[in-house]
Amino acid sequence: MKCFVTGATGFLGSHVARQLLARGGELRLLMRPTSRTDNIDDLPGERVVGDLRDPGSLAKGMSGCEFVFHVAADYRLWARNRQELYDSNVEGTRNVLQAARESGVRRVIYTSSVATMGFGNNGHLTDEQTPVALSNMIGDYKRSKFMAERLVIEAAQAGQNVVMVNPTTPIGERDIKPTPTGRIVVDFLKRKFPAYVDTGLNLVDVVDCAEGHLLAMEKAAPGERYILGGENLTLKQILDKLAAITGLPSPKVKLPYAMAYATGVVDTLVTGRMMGREPRVTLDSVRMGRKKMFVSSAKAERNLGWKPRPVDEALRRAADWFRANGYAA
């Protein structure tokens, strides 16, 4: 079983690669010339230097492969050049699908995001059937992932064997960037959480999330999508869990939305537009946080046999890994 994996040097992709290897898979890993390779230095397999925006490198990587795991994405809630997100997430996905068709790949497993789902304030859990449109997407990351999903759906409708998984917010070790979710843990460890906002996320153990990708490879119906989520938790509940794990205090002050919004406006304007650096609090992240991103993974559990575990151990592994690797004292 020869598998081509994009994004293997990153957080989730490296876990997908490790689980494929554990099941006897032969790996071919796409990496950019500038990629940090910490997450794959100990993994056997062929490295293909290239880029999602370079169709030639994708064709080379997929040659002779049975499965393609397209995990790579430009996951940023702020970018100085917004077009970079669309070039990688949308055009890069278009290139992956085209190269897979031309290479005769048996199946493509595409990693989307729960960010493309529709969330309301009615208290109902979001699932794969919840209505949503491009106009519901906040920020360039969400818009670019939504547009990439449309390409995948169109490819499936045209007969290409492609399936889609929608992870929520993976948590665990090897979050080298770190992701926006990982930054919550790092900021907590560095005691940069004096207050919290009334928002909510679904956290999933990154190991379980990677396993969901392999189950999609084996069991998913062509053209279907599956949410891979774990526990629905408010931000305060997440911070309380981290407090119990680390012994550090959890914030007790709830920040009003208006104040959080004002902070996002100022930080995005001053740090982002004027100074050209990534803001710590982006306006898009504040706007996203107004709705709790709570979901149901019943479809994946029912149809794929997927069984996510409680996230406490994943939070512990994340905290330990960030400390051991110098992200926090």
Image (cartoon, rainbow, N blue to C red):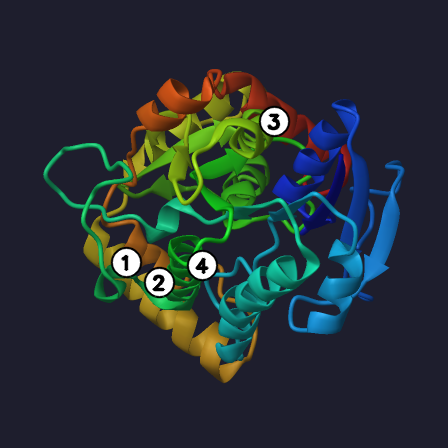
Give the mark toward the camera: 2 or 3: 3
Q: Amino acid at mark 4?
A: Ala
Q: In the rendered image, which quarter contains the C terminus?
A: top right
In the displayed orientation, state which residue is furthest to the bottom: 274
Q: Position of residue 73 (x, y in %)?
A: 57, 57
Q: Is residue 237 visible?
A: no
Q: Which residue is mark 2?
A: 284
Say which residue label 4 marks: 155
The image shows residue 78 at horizontal and vertical percentages of 48, 67
Asked whether the residues under the numbered discs 2 and 1 touch, taking CB atoms below 8 Å apart as contact, a structural biologist would say yes
* 202 relative to 204 in the view: left or right: left
Q: Is residue 79 left or right of residue 172?
A: left
Counting other residues with Cα less than 10 Å from the Cα at mark 1, is it few (<14), some (14-19), or many (20 or more)? some
Nearer-the-camera pick, 301 or 279: 301
Q: Earlier in the sequence, mark 1 or mark 4?
A: 4
Neighbours of disc 3 within 10 Å: few (<14), some (14-19), many (20+): many
Q: Secondary structure at mark 4?
A: helix
Could you tell me if the residues under marks 2 and 4 are in contact, i.e. CB atoms within 8 Å? Answer: no
Q: Is residue 155 above or below residue 84?
A: above
Give the residue type that dot 3 points to: Val
Q: Which residue is mark 1?
A: 287
Question: Comparing marks 2 and 4, which lies closer to the viewer?
Answer: 4
Q: Residue at x 13, y 33 (%)?
A: 123
